[in-house]
Amino acid sequence: MTPAFGFSVGDFISAIRVIQKICNSLQTAGGASTQYQRVMVELNGLSNVLHQLEKIGPTEDDAGQVNTLRAMVRACELQLSDFLSKLEKYKASLTPFSTSSTLKAAGRKAQWALEMESETEKIRIHVMANVVSINAFLQAHDS
């Protein structure tokens, strides 16, 4: 039976989970700052690899294959670029040498916990699919 206030037990449980998520992100050790920094390290590493792949020069024998590889790399780079633009607003608050006020940083950490953790997992899945495709392409044409 639903209480007269219009709230159910499920609503309260959901609210408690959101509060727990925010509290975890506000911890000084770990939390949103650490997650943000790990994501940035991963993305920078992947970006470096993609730039190296993009530099591969075609020969007469493999021009079509190299162009296909470049298209695959470019698709991955576009996804990364879009995601990095979303992360830009967190930079001042979640980097190791943050210059943001404690209140602003706390707000960004909470926002990260509520929005970006799931976004991060989505981009990992998309990028991983691209990386697997690129790797399979390279292996098929390396032989």
Image (tube, rainbow, N blue to C red):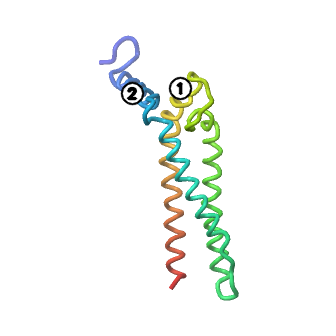
Residue type highlighted by circle 2:
Gln
> Is there CB contact under 8 Å for labels 1 and 2?
no
Real-space Cα distance between discs 1 and 2?
14 Å
87 or 33: which is nearer to us?
A: 33
Q: Is residue 125 above or below residue 130?
A: above
106 left or right of 11 in image? right
Horizontal and vertical percent position of residue 17: 38, 28
| Structural crowding at the residue carrying mark 1, measured as other residues with C-alpha within 10 Å and reported as few (<14), some (14–19) or many (≥20) | many
Q: Which mark is on residue 127? A: none
* Residue at the bottom extreme, as displayed: 61
| Structural crowding at the residue carrying mark 2, measured as other residues with C-alpha within 10 Å and reported as few (<14), some (14–19) or many (≥20) | few
Residue drawn at the location 65% of the way across and 75% of the way down: 56
Residue drawn at the location 63% of the way across and 74% of the way down: 68
* Residue at the top extreme, as displayed: 4
Which residue in the protein does label 1 denote? Answer: 106
Residue type highlighted by circle 1:
Ala
Q: Is residue 135 above or below residue 112?
A: below
Horizontal and vertical percent position of residue 63: 68, 82
Which residue in the protein does label 2 denote? Answer: 20
Horizontal and vertical percent position of residue 118: 48, 42
Residue drawn at the location 61% of the way across and 64% of the way down: 50
* Residue at the front extreme, as displayed: 97
Quarter of the figure with the N terminus: top left
Q: Which element is circle 2 on?
A: helix
Q: Which element is circle 1 on?
A: helix
Instruction: Give the total number of marks visible in the rendering.
Output: 2
Q: Is tag 1's residue or tag 2's residue first in the polypeptide sequence?
A: 2
Front tag of 1 and 2: 1
Q: Would you identify the image quadrant in which residue 74 lies?
A: bottom right
Q: Would you identify the image quadrant in which residue 45 lies?
A: bottom right
